[in-house]
Amino acid sequence: MKKNIEIFPNMEALFGTRDENLRLLEDGLNVSISMKPDAVEIEGAARDVARAERVFTDYDHLRRTGYGFQNGDLGDMLRVITTDENATLRGLAEAGRQRSFGKRVLQPKSLNQRRYLEAIEKTDMVFGIGPAGTGKTYLAVAMAVAALLNKRVNRIVLARPAVEAGERLGFLPGTLQEKVDPYLRPLYDALYEMMDPERVDRLLEKNVIEVAPIAFMRGRTLNDSFIILDEAQNTTSEQMKMFVTRMGFNSKAVITGDITQIDLPQSKRSGLVEAADILKSVDGLTFCYFDESDVVRHNLVQRIIRAYDEQKVRAENQLSLDLGAGNGNGARRAPAEADSEYRYEEER
């Protein structure tokens, strides 16, 4: 099937640098796009052509209504569209408007990020589990800031376990807050990236935004709050149970973590791993999982994560082979067992 779309004003902005967006649509939707003197021709299966045509019509509508794409947002939206048949350019753009804070608009960069943002909007408690660099914490903090600025909540509470500090906290200089602040720095970084530093400082002083170790959550009930627990893989079972029961009325909670980077002592089971098992069938909460394809940092990070995953698989396969060899009929006897049989033969 072929479909010609008449060229409209500023259509070339949709093509991207060196037509990279057209190539993305061609690869993702399995269509061929070519330029004619007064039109763009799309060729492919009828369903695929219809999806590509929808991108062009949505883009024209958004342009007419004054929507502006910023900093690669268009390319990110197109990647989501090519992987999710239910996603549309207009739908993603309008959803981004609802999540806006200040001059910035929050857009997902992958299908899993889109599901994560939608889960946060629709569900009161969300678990985001996946490797580093997938945007788990950044997106959660951004959604919290958007909720605060749009007056859907009255405060933001950001918590993080200070596992590395342990009992050595008392030997560090400064107040207790100054001792734990280094372990909470990633949360501060996300806040300062989304809001003016002066405004962040004022909200911190007024306790509208609170950044604290998870230990500070005990005994509290948090109403009208957006609560985030970062690095949740380093919580104990007791800490996780304590945190997920802090929610009050009109509150949301987002718990993020990477279960491949657990820093707890070996005798302690991760509260995040346990919660994923115990709470998986509880109504009213959602588990969102990320993988290496969702990494939004440097491309090298994706390759590093993939290399570690491959090494883990090789190690597990080698362990299985070793165990299989040890239990087989041709298994080598232990040295002590062989020596005892040798001595028995000599005595006989």
Image: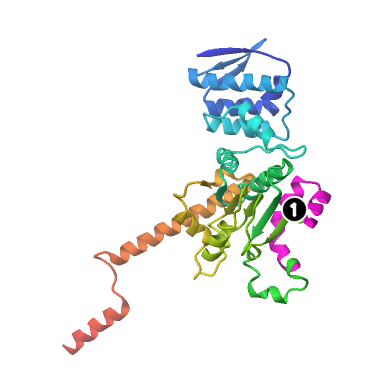
Instruction: Tell me where residue 69 sits by quadrant.
Output: top right
In this picture, which residue range is highlighted in magenta?
178-206
Task: Report the magenta stretch's main SS.
Answer: helix
Q: Amino acid at mark 1?
A: Val
According to the picture, the residue beneath numbered tag 1 turns out to be 208
Residue at left offset 55%, top offset 22%: 51
Residue at left offset 58%, top offset 59%: 243
Residue at left offset 23%, top offset 86%: 343
Residue 110, position in %: x, y?
59, 38
Quarter that holds the C terminus: bottom left
Residue at left offset 60%, top offset 47%: 134
Q: Residues within 10 Å of mark 1 (few under 14, many from 20)?
A: some
Left or right, 272 with respect to 148, comes to: left
- The residue tagged with tag 1: helix, strand or loop? loop
Residue 68, position in %: x, y?
74, 28
Relative height, residue 203 to residue 325 (above, below) = above
Q: Nearer the viewer, residue 177 or 184?
A: 177
Q: Residue furthest right?
A: 198
Q: Nearer the viewer, residue 80 or 28?
A: 80
Relative height, residue 73 to residue 257 (above, below) = above
Q: Residue furthest top?
A: 38
Residue 207 lies within the magenta run: no
Left or right, 49 with respect to 16, comes to: left
